[in-house]
Image (cartoon, helix red, strand yellow):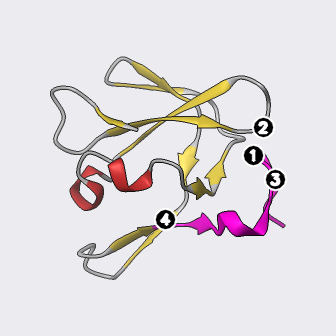
Amino acid sequence: CEAVKKSEKLLKFTLDDGSGTDRTIVSGIRKWYGDGASLVGKTVIIVANLKPAKIRGIVSEGMILSAADDNDETLSVSTILSEAGLPAGARVR
């Protein structure tokens, strides 16, 4: 995870989605996660069946699922406990 240069809102994630090829996702959650270091190594839930979109010159291949309060003051990325032993790419059912 890294901050997108010249952006105050965006983080760029490089994720293992279980396909054998890294997936890049750009997300506007920098306000809540700073440089994103606290998300490195987490197993996050993504929406993967979206058409890729170019954001600030970076092709984003999905969305990271998160929830926020009504005022957007608190936001939390949806994660899976790594102790569950699920492999990268496990499907949400």
Q: Which residue is mark 4?
A: 66
The mark total stands at 4
Disc nearest the viewer among 2 and 4: 2
* Magenta range: 77-93
Q: Which residue is mark 2?
A: 18
Q: Are marks 1 and 4 in contact (CB under 8 Å)?
A: no
Q: Which residue is mark 3?
A: 90
**The furthest residue to the top:** 57
C-alpha separation, residue under disc 2 versus residue under disc 4: 20 Å
Q: Indicate the amino acid at tag 2.
A: Gly
Residue at 41% x, 21% y is 58
Residue 90 included in the magenta stretch of the image: yes
Q: Are marks 2 and 3 in contact (CB under 8 Å)?
A: yes
Q: Tell me which label, 2 or 3, sits earlier in the chain.
A: 2
Crowd class of label 3 (few under 14; some 14 to 19; many from 20; radius 10 Å): few
Disc nearest the viewer among 4 and 3: 3
Q: Are marks 3 and 1 in contact (CB under 8 Å)?
A: yes
C-alpha separation, residue under disc 4 versus residue under disc 3: 18 Å
Q: Quadrant of residue 48?
A: top right
Q: Indicate the amino acid at tag 4.
A: Ser
Q: Which residue is mark 1?
A: 88
Q: Tell me which label, 2 or 4, sits earlier in the chain.
A: 2
Residue at 71% x, 39% y is 17
